[in-house]
Image: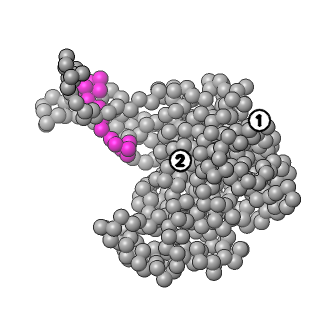
Amino acid sequence: MTHQRSLTLNENDAAQPLCDLPVLSGTTGPNVIDVQALYKETGMFTYDPGFNSTASCRSTITFIDGEEGILLYRGYPIEQLAEQCNFLEVCYLILKGNLPNKDEINTFQNNITMHTMVHDQLTNFFKGFRRDAHPMAIMVGVVGALSAFYHDALDIRSKKDREMCAIRLIAKVPTIVAMCHKYSTGMPFMYPDNKLSYVENFLRMMHATPCDDYLPNPILVRALDRILILHADHEQNASTSTVRLAGSSGANPFACITAGIACLWGAAHGGANEAVLNMLEDIGDVSKIPEYIKRAKDKNDPFRLMGFGHRVYKNHDPRAKLMRQTCHEVLNELGLHDIKLFELALELERIALEDEYFIEKKLYPNVDFYSGIVLHALGIPTNMFTAMFAMGRTVGWIAHWDEMISDPEQKIGRPRQLYTGAARRDVPDNHHQA
């Protein structure tokens, strides 16, 4: 990151400039104006609701070009990573900055495997929740409790402790997610099996029972592995920014990741793939699709097709292309094309890719559209979709948290505001009589 030039700020075209602001350039992407000295020199702040035009940090982890449909993890295109790597290799890359060699991935994978169990007393937390509680409500509580059980490595200034927290979170979150599912269905918890791979182990914990084991299908395992890769990180989104903001206070990593999970729970963020399935169920039949397409095109109708378009990508979402391929592989493997829900999804996909309105508006199916369909085909209940998202995103959150803690420029987060309330006023002497 270098100082490229200065930007002179004038007020009302005055002859005298208010201040000169440095313009910084990164490896790639747009330049940014460094406004750190703005208030000191001018007495003014910037106003940017949603922080859509504000860079809150320097980061080396993920780069997105929404106009061109580009997503890079540590410089590697998501397309190459999804095709050539497994999820734990991508986790290593996101955490360490480089793809692992054979010895490095074997050590990393072994460390993850050895930490998939959770403290036995943690199971008592589940008994305090209603059986019909949303899995995300349970997940927020249980992940937040991890710091009470693993407080031997909570020195955030220790690189060794931060690495141990990363290993524990990546290893234990899948176990907790599976436990959330089992608890909500009244089934006994299934403990991890160290002989299985990361994704195989998770699917077994989700679907096996003490009286009926689960044999992972390689195509389905690969499909879920790819979902996790595609969701591993996505730059400074709402939940990642929440993790960084919580971490800026010095909070422990388990608390910070819990904050990210809570933020992800919002329907506008991690709940999008769940909303896709709910929308398909509302449509109900292929014959009703034209009616819903007409509503989607009507500016006066509040109805919106879920799973189409993206806030960041103004072109094809590169993750959606990969997820579309995976979606069709799974449906072919399981022979589900004739089931009504999947018929609906495939017809909506066809229309979106051919209809001039959708093409002109660039309302292409996004990763949430396809991932919801795939998760449903894998037997994952709809209310578990956001928990699955959190499982994949945990590595991104912990990498950003670690990067922030290691950054000497970072300070405790403290956004400013444009105050529009009442000006100073005095309490009247007779206010009790009013």
Residue 106 vs residue 153, the one in the foreground:
153
Q: Residue furthest bottom?
A: 287
Residue type at mark 2: give it: Leu
Instruction: Give the total number of marks visible in the rendering.
Output: 2
SS label for mark 1: helix
In the displayed structure, 220 sits above or below 100; it is below
Residue 231 vs residue 289, the one in the foreground:
289
Q: Please report the residue visible at 62 percent of the width from the left and 24 percent of the height from the top.
A: 157
The colour scheme used to paint the residues is: one colour
- Percent across and percent down for residue 235 are 51, 46
Is residue 51 rendered magenta in the image? Answer: yes
Quadrant position of the N terminus in the picture: top left
Q: Which residue is mark 1?
A: 121
Q: Please report the residue visible at 26 percent of the width from the left and 29 percent of the height from the top.
A: 44
SS label for mark 2: helix
Quarter of the image holding residue 363? bottom left
The tag on residue 26 is none
Say few, some or many: other residues with alpha carbon within 10 Å of mark 2 (under 14 / 14 to 19 / 20 or more). Answer: many
Give the side of residue 418 with respect to residue 367, left or right: left
- Percent across and percent down for residue 11 are 17, 34
* Gap in angstroms between the C-alphas marked 2 and 1: 27 Å
Residue type at mark 1: give it: Gln
Give the side of residue 48 with respect to residue 263, left or right: left
Quadrant position of the C terminus in the picture: top left
Q: Please report the residue visible at 57 percent of the width from the left and 44 percent of the height from the top.
A: 261
Q: Please report the residue visible at 12 percent of the width from the left and 31 percent of the height from the top.
A: 15
The tag on residue 264 is 2
Give the side of residue 208 with respect to residue 258, left or right: right
Q: Residue furthest front?
A: 433
Residue range corresponding to the magenta coloring: 39-53
